[in-house]
Image (cartoon, helix red, strand yellow):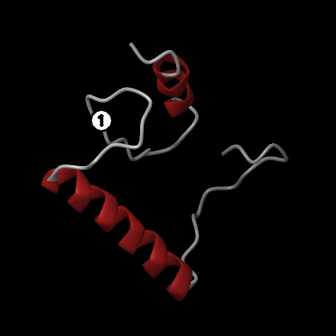
Amino acid sequence: MDFLKTHGETLLESFVDPLVIRHPKGHTVPRLDDKSLETMLDFLQKIENDLSTGTTSDNEHNEDGLIN
């Protein structure tokens, strides 16, 4: 079992709507199947679009960078 998985699962609770791609290979850089690759490419496209249009979150953040 991946010794970092438990910490990563706990860390997910810190994010609003996190993107999670699960794979069976433990703590490695996996070769993505078609579905996971599509998910990753959609995520990257969204980030690229947000950056090019100046879209930002409407949420306010405290001094620690966490959403209030």
Q: Residue furthest right?
A: 63
Q: Relative to 2, is 24 above or below?
A: below
Q: Secondary structure at mark 1?
A: loop
Asked whether, in this view, residue 3 is left or right of residue 68, the answer is left
Q: Amino acid at mark 1?
A: Arg
In the displayed structure image, the side of residue 36 where residue 14 appears, left or right: right
- What residue does disc 1 label? 22
Determine the image quadrant of residue 58. bottom right
Instruction: Look at the picture and state if 60 lies above or below 20.
Output: below
**Which quadrant: the N terminus?**
top left
Q: Quadrant of the C terminus?
A: top right
Residue farthest along the left direction in this orientation: 34
Tell me which corner region of the image, top left, top right, bottom left or bottom right, holds residue 39: bottom left
Q: Where residue 7 sits: x, y (%)? A: 55, 21
Residue at figure coordinates x 17%, y 49% from the top left: 33
64 vs 16, left or right, is right
52 versus 47 height, above or below? below
What percent of the width, then of the height, locates residue 36? 23, 51
Number of marks in picture: 1
Q: Residue at x 42, y 36 (%)?
A: 28
Task: Give percent across and percent down for residue 10.
Answer: 53, 22
**Residue at 47% across / 77% down in the picture?**
48
Q: Nearer the viewer, residue 49 or 61?
A: 49
Label 1 Cα crowd, 10 Å radius (few <14 / some 14-19 / many 20+):
few
Residue ranking furthest to the bottom: 53
